[in-house]
Image (cartoon, rainbow, N blue to C red):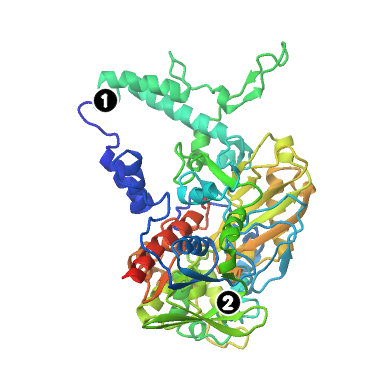
Amino acid sequence: MNRPALLHAALALALLAAQPARAQGPDGKTLFAKNCAACHQANGRGIPGAFPALAGSQVALGEPAQAATVLLKGRGGMPAFSGSLDDAEIAGVLSYVRASWGNSAAGVSGAEVEALRTALQVPPPSRGRFGNKN
Amino acid sequence: MNGRNPSLTRREFLYRAAAVGGSSLLLNTMNAWGMGIASRVTAPPQLSGSGKGKKVVILGAGLAGLTAAYELGKLGYSVQVLEARAFAGGRCQTARKGFSLEELGGETQHCNFDEGHYINHGPWRIPLDHQSTLYYTRLFDVPLEVMVNDNDHAFVYLEDAGPLSKQRLRGAQIKADMRGHVAELLAKTVQDHQLDARLGSDDQALLLDYLVNEGALGKRDLSYKGRNGRGFAVNPGAGLAPGPGKPSDPLAFSDLLAAKVGKVYSAVQEFPMHATMFQPVGGMDQIPRAFVRRVGKTIRYNAVVERIRQAPDGVTIGYRDGASNKLATVRADYCLCTVPLSVLRMVDTDFSERFKAAVQAVPYAPVGKIGLQMRRRFWEEDEQIYGGHVLTDIKGINTISLPSGGWQQRKGVVLGYYNYSLDAIEVSALTPAERTEFALGAGEKIFPGYRDAFEHSFSVAWHRVRHSLGGWGDWSDETRRSAYPVLLEGEGRVLLAGEHLSYLTGWQAGAIESAWQQIERLHRRASA
């Protein structure tokens, strides 16, 4: 949609509610439920013919940089999450995916995502969205 | 102005028109100035010859498919439309009593609105700029009513607006005060001779005249002290009380600047948000229904396309019949595929790798809406807001829009949120009941009677709707350069059409004008 963010919106109430957990790092499961489960489903199995499964996914379980790039830049029908999730959150949700539903790949650190964001020249999260289209 | 002319030249205007609207808008603009180029976007292409003896299979009975079926049928082509759903219209849908919608991975919602109430959960407005959509509503006698798209009396409610946070401001207050304060500042700058280097004395006098009028400034002191257009503290009326009423005080310039509310408004509406905006009386699906009355016999419903194969002499489409679950095929000389790219990418085709890559390159916009039936029109009765949008930065809401019809009736359906992108994804993870709670929780911050008046809800998350998988094609500059030309060209005997092959993405006009363009291409190939 490429609209300029006109106003910085307040943080999501849900995000504020999740803040106590932020002290030990973002809660990957909560982030997954909010940002990913609508399409990939809470059980990580996706919907055949529409949304790919993350359980056993070669993309999700492959090189951390490759998996993190999908979240930073989007892939196919999936939008980029770089505007709404910060590096620690992307690392948290990705680590959750890589360790759930029988998946067992190493976690990803916020520093790795931060380095990747810089390398890919992806701007920092803006979070605010406001507009009137279609 | 001092020998220079900083205003838009006609050439610049044409250039800008082309930049925002593409070359078809350029043609249209030139035509409007009597430059003698017939507009191609206000009517279907005038095609000569005949399609007799040739068969075209059209995939999808949305507005692009319906337009093509109607126009190709007139040319004599034998037309067969395959539609995955049990009804025509594609994303052009209206939820009213009896309508149901299942989201992938979610529960089926049944619309329980009272008789006569509805929500257009897909396209909901027809701009005056979209003469193609208006061509068919006129041709097919689809009654229209004004859709109130611009209402300065509606609230602006911002949570992150510094000193003006969490206040119910009226759009008119913000506009009047921002423009008044800016006009005062500029006028006083002129008066202090700070613009002498830029502006001759004649132009300075003319500018001051303009600013006094534009900003409602005092003629002598060039000060802005409010204007009646921003509203009264006590409205004028009869007798001595209220008599002349009591003027209201303007918002402070520094508060307005700190709140950044100026960014909410532009003095000139974006194309295509101009007034007048329309909607069909009784729901947007009146448009596909009007098409179906004319081309309905050519549509096979519940036909889900699974396979596209081409041969030198024709196209074979494999589809699954939703009722019997049996596979069947249709053969045709040509195929016009209006299936969204988000769905086409999953169809088994023999397209070249280059074409497949182009189909897969385009993401689709996550989009969500919710309709809330209210038992009382508190926005009209308590706040004197008749239609229009309440603009807010409450996360995930974006706008609360009031119905543009049924004025002063008892009940009405409010659009409780219209979110895009990642906001739409977050809200779509909620169950229908949780979405309703989310919408009510936001709305009651702005309208005290919101929760109490609520009766029924109906929500959609378009990225989770089968056969659509998104609101509209979400192009980037990069994909416009790489994938767009490939897709426009089609491949062999298959051509694509739809809003995704236009610069009017997400608009019905994009679907219609794309169909017009592609049937001309198809006819040319078929006539060669």
| CA separation in Å, label 1 and label 2 | 66 Å
Mark 2 crowdedness (10 Å alpha carbons): few <14, some 14-19, many ≥20 = many
Label 1 or label 2, whichever lies nearer to me, is: 2
Nearest the viewer among B117 and B60 is B60
Along the line of sight, the residue nearer the viewer: B517 or B511: B517
Mark 1, residue position:
B199
- Name the residue type under label 1: Leu
Vertical order, B410 against A132 (above or below): above
What residue type is disc 2 on?
Val
Q: Is residue A56 left or right of B180 when viewed as pictured?
A: right
Residue B270, given in percent of the width and then of the height, sits at 45, 44
**Residue B264 image position (x, y, % from top left):** 51, 42
Horizontal and vertical percent for residue B480? 36, 64
Quadrant of the drawing holding the N terminus of chain B: top left
Residue where numbered disc 2 is placed? B304
Query: Residue at 63% across / 76% down in the picture?
Result: A41
Residue B465 against residue B174 in the figure, above or below: below
Where does the C terminus of chain B fall, quadrant-wise?
A: bottom left
Dot 1 surroundings within 10 Å: few (below 14), some, or many (20 or more)? some
Residue plotted at (42% across, 49% down): B42
Task: Please say if B257 is above or below B354.
Answer: above
Between A110 and B247, the residue placed more toward the observer is: B247
Q: Chain of mark 1?
A: B
Tell me which label, 1 or 2, sits earlier in the chain. Answer: 1
Q: Are marks 1 and 2 in contact (CB under 8 Å)?
A: no
Tell which residue pokes out farthest to the top in this image: B240
Left or right placement of residue A105 versus residue B237 in this view: left
Q: Secondary structure at mark 2?
A: strand
